[in-house]
Image (spheres, rainbow, N blue to C red):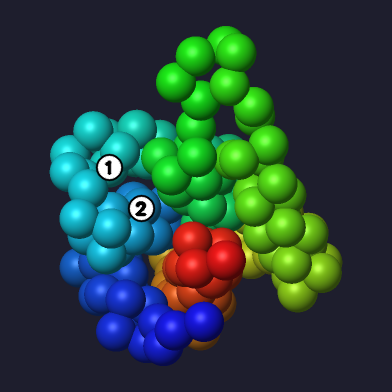
Amino acid sequence: MGNYGGIQENALNYFNSGYNCCESVVIAVCEHLGLDKEIPQKIATPFGSGMSRNGSNCGALNAAFICMGLIGGRKSNKDSRDISYLPADRIFAKFREKYKSTCCCDITGVNLRDPEELAKKKEWMHNELCGPLVQQVTKWVLEEIDI
């Protein structure tokens, strides 16, 4: 397995420049793989912030699933789903073990639809929680690619 620090840093830089958690992971992985990022980035947009600020599935985790689809998604209904399902499932299990939940609202403890609450916790959430989480998920995706 390789050293992913530079790619993880790219994901964090995207996150710090205004891309959401899902977009940041997807863009960094696409760049690493030499894939066109425009369409995957567009697909990733509504999956950030717990699925459009709904506090549901973590956007970075959603990005892992998008990436596994980009890498191993089926080209026909006769192809096996396992090429994308199995690595996505491994990332899901690691994520749930580390963060104890897959839901953004559980992980952050923040109601993303409450502007006052979000304003109070946004800097902490961005820098201390979600930024490192974006880097961690990026690493897990890259590890699966290297297997």
Mark 1 Cα-neighbour bin, 10 Å: few <14, some 14–19, many ≥20? many
Q: Residues within 10 Å of mark 2 (few under 14, many from 20)?
A: many
Tell me: 83 left or right of 7.
right
Position in image of residue 51 (x %, y %): 53, 39
Q: Where does label 2 land, which residue?
A: 26
The spot of residue 10 in percent (x, y) is 26, 75
Kind of element beneath mark 1 = helix
Query: Is residue 52 at all visible to an observer of this figure?
Result: no
* Sooner in the amino-acid sequence: mark 1 or mark 2: 2
Q: Amino acid at mark 2?
A: Val
Number of callouts: 2
**Residue visible at 82% across and 69% down in the picture:** 97
Which residue is at 50% across, 40% downward? 72
Tell me the residue that label 1 is attached to. 41
Location of residue 2 with respect to 28 vertically, above or below: below
* Side of 6 where 66 appears, left or right: right
Which of the image's four quarters has the C terminus? bottom right
The foreground one among 84 and 133 is: 84
Report the amino acid beneath label 1: Gln
Q: Position of residue 121 (x, y in %)?
A: 51, 72
Q: Are marks 1 and 2 in contact (CB under 8 Å)?
A: yes
Give how far across and how far down residue 69 sits, in percent.
Answer: 49, 37
Identified at 51% across, 25% down, the residue is 74
Residue 82 seen = yes
Q: Is residue 56 placed above or below 117 in the rendered structure?
A: above
The alpha-carbon separation of the residues under discs 1 and 2 comes to: 6 Å
Q: Secondary structure at mark 2?
A: helix
Horizontal arrangement in the rendering, residue 56 relative to residue 124 (left or right): right
Is residue 78 depicted above or below 98 in this figure?
above
Residue 19 tag number: none
